[in-house]
Amino acid sequence: MTKHGAARSHEAAAAHVTGRAVYTDDQVRPTGMLTCWPVHSPHAHARITGVDAAPALAVRGVVTVLRPQDIPGPNDVSGHTHDEQLLPTDEVHYLGQAVTWVVAETDDAARLGAAAVTVDYEPLPAVTTLTAAIAADSYSGPEKWITRGDAEAVLATAPLVLDGEVLIGGQDHFYLETQASWASIDAEGNVVVHSSTQHPAETQIVVARVLGLARNRVTVTCLRMGGGFGGKETQANGCAAIAALAAYVTGRPVRVRLNREQDMVLTGKRHPFHARYRVAATQDGRLLALQVALTSDGGWSLDLSEPVTSRAMFHVDNSYYIPQLTVSGRVARTNTTSHTAFRGFGGPQGMLVAEEVLERVARHLGLRPEEVRRRNLYRDAADCPPDEVDAATTHYGQLIEGNRLPRIWRELLDSSDFTARRAGITAHNASRPHRKRGLAITPVKFGISFTNTKYNQAGALVLIYADGSIQLNHGGTEMGQGLHTKMLEVAASTLGVSPGRFRAMPTATDKVPNTSATAASSGSDLNGQAVRDSCLTLRLRLSEVAARMLGRTGSEDLVFVAERVHAPGEPGHAVAFDEVVAEAYAQMVSLSATGFYRTPNIHWNPETGRGKPFHYFAYGAAVSEVEVDGFTGCFRLRRVDILHDVGDSLNPLVDRGQVEGGFVQGMGWLTMEEVVWDATGRLQTFAPSTYKIPTVSEVPEDFRVQLLSDATQDRTVHGSKAVGEPPLMLALSVREAIRDAVAAFASTPEAARHVPLASPATPEATLWAIERLRDRAPRLQQVAVPP
């Protein structure tokens, strides 16, 4: 038997490390499979005036070239906004966009065919940066607002008012497995798609739409993904639709598998953001009011940009009570690839703004940032008198219940030996003119649920076979995060058997329909409850059979444990699980059950900016210590201490891995992963040679991760909490530790009262920040930089 909370290895760990794990493009290829290659636009914005595919068709091995007129249904692969064509008909909107796809017998033939296609363009004006889009008033969709109180009135009379702006860079998902899909048409004209997708149901919807079919004619299966991070939530749909269209046109199975450069050019990134703020505070650093205008770079189409921007608006407070707060959000339209979901889904960008504001206030007042942060933390609703409950209420009206931040803050300061280390760093910096150390602690409060309320539902299907083996199906997808491992443990603990009895099936739309994306950190919450619901139904049926076998009249209180079933307090008088299953089959009792779950008591009104969009909040905090080289701007991450709230962990081993991995990925976004387009809109960072992600050398030298103890969460599966996204925001402590080290280079205390720092804080950006505080930036700006 398994027990939830066991530190078990990932169910496919051995297959991953030995290379036996099969991903979408690793399957045995069916006879006659074709492959696709894109024809990229050389312009960021242009009118298509002609396409000549004849030279491509003359290439040996080329079968066809896909054109818009080949699409039997609507030429639309957007999830909801209907602003994204599968194949452009009149215009291209970013440099690298796929104008058409060549379908051929081999990769080489497809590549040569794509090079032979001639496309004529009429170039059009292009907007290729977020700041240019703001200046040009280039937006998609309306501006949105969330308001509490009257920030404008407080800002007019406050003792301290500061203003500033922040430009936040994007991030490439850089999953190990690039986008991949296989498609075939069966003898009845039904479509079978294997896709590396986080949202099989939406991939089914898009493929059915493009082919003009009912959804029951399309089956989408996801074996597993080699990483997703949000990049396969919507953007897997286009590859699947191309493969399906090519299969429809040719009548043969077709694959699409992007190489690394194609993937980086064609797919969206974490949204770059621009924020402009005004903040009012008291002389002891307590925030009084905040106005923030957020603008996200959506790229050429909306994709998920509006909900991403909304989540940034939800999280612009991070963990801090701000009595008067007004935040606006808008999506800028640029001629770059369409940006999309990324781990945190806008939350990290909003929380970065919050930390920027807190740091700015603290340094301006000459106060320690950690003390200003502590003074502004939200309180718990249970600790507030009725007239002070606002201090435990978010700016969108949700009461913060079970706030663990004050406890986490105290315990982490103590376990990290923060005070003594702060004194040691001060002494170190006083004697080292060219290498300074920095220390910072930052909190995380992250809302868990889809903010589009209808997505907070999940289904499952559990099948028990007469030999006692069990098949587990649920609507979540496995992308290396350990979801299947957790679902196996939930099912096994509910039925009182070993996980070895189960086979976790690939996620498929013909087993569990109408599923939500595996996203928003809700995979375990939603699917775990649905799996448990299925197993409880089966357990009830088996209990009635077992009661008769045990000679009992009642079945409600039977215990399922250690592969056996017995009455409470009577473990010596038990029947084996296998025997109960066999008897249930003999008695013609159904041994399959569906399960369903929907998150209770959540709601959101986007018109009023009020509601309870989140089921609960995940909390955490991190202390980071860095050392920065004053000659190069390079930093070394000396030590990280993390205390994170995962409730009662379903699997501490998996959860620790998520905390560690999320933190390192966040550190990459904030310090080294710089996405760069040139003035023409061409992506310059399209490969590992030009795009730097963290490696083992950037992992903290001393990495201490603790999961919060005694942290049962009410109304969740086995008292657990989501853990996928929240740890990424813990890396904000690295950025603030770098800022702390940069401040130590200041030529005067007055110079350190404002420490601007770019995001990402690359070595170049950090060096410039140091030189500004040394008052040497003007001299450096005169140095010629080679092109």
Image (tube, rainbow, N blue to C red):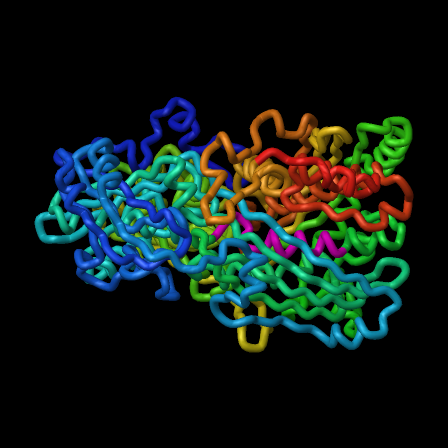
Question: Which residue lies most toward the left here?
Answer: 187
Nearest to the observer: residue 463 or residue 310: 310
Nearest to the observer: residue 370 or residue 669: 669
Question: Which residue lies most toward the top here?
Answer: 18
**Residue 196 falls left or right of residue 433:** left
Name the chief secondary structure element in magenta.
helix
Q: Give the magenta range.
A: 341-357
Question: Which quadrant of the view contains residue 178?
Answer: top left
Position in image of residue 625 (x %, y %) = 75, 34
Q: In this view of the protein, can residue 539 be seen by the observer?
A: no
Position in image of residue 190 (x %, y %) = 15, 53
Q: Quadrant of the N terminus?
A: top left
* Image vertical order of residue 263 relative to residue 48, above or below: above
Position in image of residue 267 (x %, y %) = 41, 47
* Image vertical order of residue 709 relative to residue 131, above or below: above
Residue at (35% x, 30% y) in the render: 21
Residue at (59% x, 42% y) in the render: 669
Q: In this view of the protein, can residue 177 be seen by the observer?
A: yes
**Residue 659 falls left or right of residue 279:** left
Q: Is residue 21 magenta?
A: no
Q: Is residue 344 magenta?
A: yes
Nearest to the observer: residue 595 or residue 34: 34
Q: Quadrant of the C terminus?
A: top right
* Count of all numbered marks drawn on residues in the image: 0
Residue at (71% x, 49% y) in the render: 443
Position in image of residue 616 (x %, y %) = 59, 58
Residue at (39% x, 41% y) in the render: 263
Nearest to the observer: residue 537 or residue 553: 537
* Image vertical order of residue 631 relative to residue 242, above or below: above
